[in-house]
Image: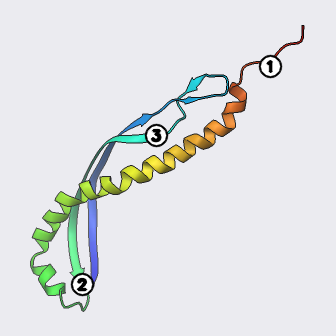
């Protein structure tokens, strides 16, 4: 079974919260763990076509508009469920990497000799 489709008019609105991280000198910087606080995705699947030699191909073709409507309703929430933890993990790792690199630069001056 081959499923072909076109996705149009896609938008995504995401909200993020970045926890502060403390440097060795006690300075707080916005490079701590990130969480996705909101996710809203909209997409319109069109031109949904089923082809091939599958036994369900005919049934899917006959109910194509209902399948397309179901996909348009359910795809945004499924996409958010998958994207939120992925984005949080990848972005948190990237921020931690930046923190590792800039933390030495954010240390206070050492003790000056008398």
Please report contact status of discs 1 and 2: CB closer than 8 Å, yes or no.
no
- Mark closest to the chain's N terminus, 3 or 2: 3
- Could you tell me which quadrant the N terminus lies in? bottom left
- Left or right, 25 with respect to 39, comes to right
- Percent across and percent down for residue 79 are 31, 56
Separation of residues labelled 1 and 3 (CA atoms): 31 Å
- Mark closest to the chain's N terminus, 1 or 3: 3
**Residue visible at 27% across and 65% down in the picture:** 6
- Percent across and percent down for residue 19 are 47, 33
Where residue 22 is drawn, which disc sits there? none
Q: Label 1 belongs to which residue?
A: 110
- Mark closest to the chain's N terminus, 1 or 2: 2
Rendered position, 28 above or below 33:
above
- Left or right, 49 with respect to 107, comes to left
- Could you tell me which quadrant the C terminus lies in? top right
Q: Label 2 belongs to which residue?
A: 51
Q: Label 3 belongs to which residue?
A: 34
Q: Secondary structure at mark 2?
A: strand
Query: In which image quadrant can residue 36 be found?
Result: top left
- Percent across and percent down for residue 97 are 62, 43
């Amino acid at each position: 079974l081959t499923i072909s489709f076109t996705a149009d008019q896609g938008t995504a609105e995401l909200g993020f919260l970045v926890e502060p991280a403390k440097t060795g000198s006690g300075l707080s910087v916005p490079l701590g763990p990130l969480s996705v606080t909101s996710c809203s995705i909209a997409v319109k699947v069109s031109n949904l076509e089923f082809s091939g030699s599958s036994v369900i191909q005919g049934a899917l073709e006959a109910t194509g508009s209902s399948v397309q409507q179901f996909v348009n309703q359910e795809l945004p929430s499924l996409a958010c469920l998958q994207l939120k933890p992925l984005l949080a993990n990848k972005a948190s790792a990237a921020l931690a990497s930046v923190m590792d690199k800039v933390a030495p630069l954010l240390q206070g001056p050492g003790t000056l000799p008398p």
